[in-house]
């Protein structure tokens, strides 16, 4: 799967890359919501994994913009901002929400569930 990983913290992007590429996925990066939206408009992504607290465009703005696309990609939110923020992300249309620090098994399970939905 082609996965867009959106986070302004380089160490979080590298951790996500290691987890996802080890599982056989292709990972593309964006450092903020604006860059992520541009990447999604330029090429189709199978899934978007995003942080919430980022410069230029908050994760909530990204979720809303992605949901407004004609063919929106599934969205996984990973954030350390607390359960309330994750509940808002869920209400805005995130398919899965995970807390930081990310549990590699939970991340891969969410991606695998999305992959199984797409193949049905």
Image (cartoon, helix red, strand yellow):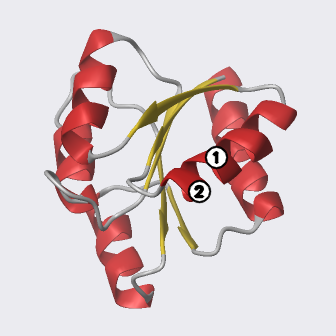
Near-viewer residue (89 or 82): 82
Residue 105 can be seen, yes or no: yes
* Residue 99 horizontal/vertical position (percent): 57, 76
Quadrant where the N terminus sits is top right
The structure residue drawn at horizontal position 75% and vertical position 63%, both measured from the top left corner, is 106
* Residue 22 horizontal/vertical position (percent): 86, 35
Residue 108 as seen in the image, left or right of residue 93: right
Residue sitting farthest toward the top: 43
The structure residue drawn at horizontal position 35% and vertical position 43%, both measured from the top left corner, is 31
Give how far apart the Cα atoms at labels 1 and 2 are. 5 Å
Label of residue 14 in the image: 1
> Which image quadrant for residue 118?
top right
* Residue 84 horizontal/vertical position (percent): 35, 88
Label of residue 11 in the image: 2
Residue 105 as seen in the image, left or right of residue 92: right
Q: Are marks 1 and 2 in contact (CB under 8 Å)?
A: yes
* Residue 82 horizontal/vertical position (percent): 43, 88
């Amino acid at each position: 799967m082609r996965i867009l990983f959106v986070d302004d913290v380089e160490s979080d992007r590298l951790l996500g890359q290691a987890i996802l590429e080890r599982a056989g996925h292709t990972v593309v990066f964006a450092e903020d919501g604006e860059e992520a939206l541009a990447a999604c408009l330029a090429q189709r992504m199978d899934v978007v994994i995003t942080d919430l607290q980022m410069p230029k465009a908050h994760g909530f703005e990204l979720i809303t913009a992605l949901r407004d696309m004609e063919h929106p990609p599934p969205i996984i939110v990973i954030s350390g901002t607390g359960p309330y923020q994750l509940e808002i992300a869920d209400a805005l249309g995130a398919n899965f929400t995970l807390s930081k620090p990310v549990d590699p098994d939970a991340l891969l399970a969410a991606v695998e569930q999305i992959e199984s939905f797409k193949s049905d």
